[in-house]
Amino acid sequence: MDFNKLSGRLIIYCLALILFSFRTNAQNTKSESTIPQWPILYVNYSIADKSLFTGGLEFCLDCKDKNKLFLGAGYGITNSYNGNYYGLPDVHLSYNTEYLLFVKAGSSSKNAYAVGGLTVFNMIDLGLGYSFPYNKEKIPTYEGFTASISFRFTKNKGAYTKLNIIQ
């Protein structure tokens, strides 16, 4: 499959997901399980054998609960080989607990990964994990133990964990 077609399809799917979320909210105002009105913009930096900078959109699938479930799609850039930059579409699912812990599993066109670690009010995720390449022969490969940091920006205050101070 041509890489440009794959990245174009990812953009179309992201736009369709955004439009569907606005339409669902407009029609289902009484439903308790709607996709939030405001998508979350996320930025992620990961380093394994190469560095990877990813940005995209996330949706909080369960913002009313104290434990949050995020579904995200984005696009990453890596400087893998010979000074060339390569793009990798990314899809992930992240489960963040109220106890400042998270676990995330995701996939791109070249690898699958699992990351776990600490979250700071669901605004910042600091994680360690492992990335598995689908095919070690084709470039770019992104494999090995992974350290990552993610930032979330949104107007949807339900996506963030509230600070409870005991009085």
Image: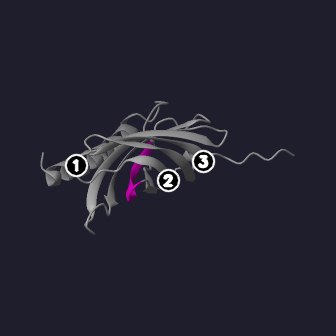
Instruction: Check disc 3 and give the amino acid type.
Output: Thr
Mark 3 residue crowding within 10 angstroms, few (<14) / some (14–19) / many (20+): many
Check disc 2 and give the amino acid type.
Ser
Circle 1 sits in a helix, a strand or a loop, which is it? helix
- How crowded is the residue under tag 1: few (<14 C-alpha within 10 Å), some, or many (20+)? few
| Residue located farthest toward the left when viewing the structure as drawn | 2
Circle 1 residue? 12
Q: What is the secondary structure assignment of the residue under circle 2?
A: strand
What secondary structure is the stretch in magenta mostly built from? strand
Q: Looking at the image, do the residues carrying marks 3 and 2 touch, with CB atoms under 8 Å apart?
A: no
| Residue 4 falls left or right of residue 13 | left
Give above or below for 139 relative to 62: below
Mark 1 is on which residue type? Ile
Residue 145 or 160: which is nearer the viewer? 145
Instruction: State the CA–CA distance, disc 3 to disc 2.
Output: 12 Å
| Residue 108, position as x, y percentages in the image | 31, 45
Q: CA distance from mark 1 to mark 3?
A: 30 Å
Asked if residue 55 lies in the magenta stretch, the reply is: yes
- Label 2: few (<14), some (14–19) or many (≥20) C-alpha neighbours in 10 Å: many
Query: Of the residues under marks 1 and 3, which one precedes in the sequence?
Result: 1
Q: Residue furthest bottom?
A: 83
Instruction: Check residue 67 for magenta coloring.
Output: no
Depth order, front residue of 2/47: 47
Q: Are marks 1 and 2 in contact (CB under 8 Å)?
A: no
- Sequence order check, earlier mark of 3 and 2: 3
On residue 119, which mark appears?
A: 3
Classify 118 as above or below 95: below
Residue where numbered disc 2 is placed: 148
Find residue 162 and report its horizontal and vertical position in percent. Answer: 67, 47
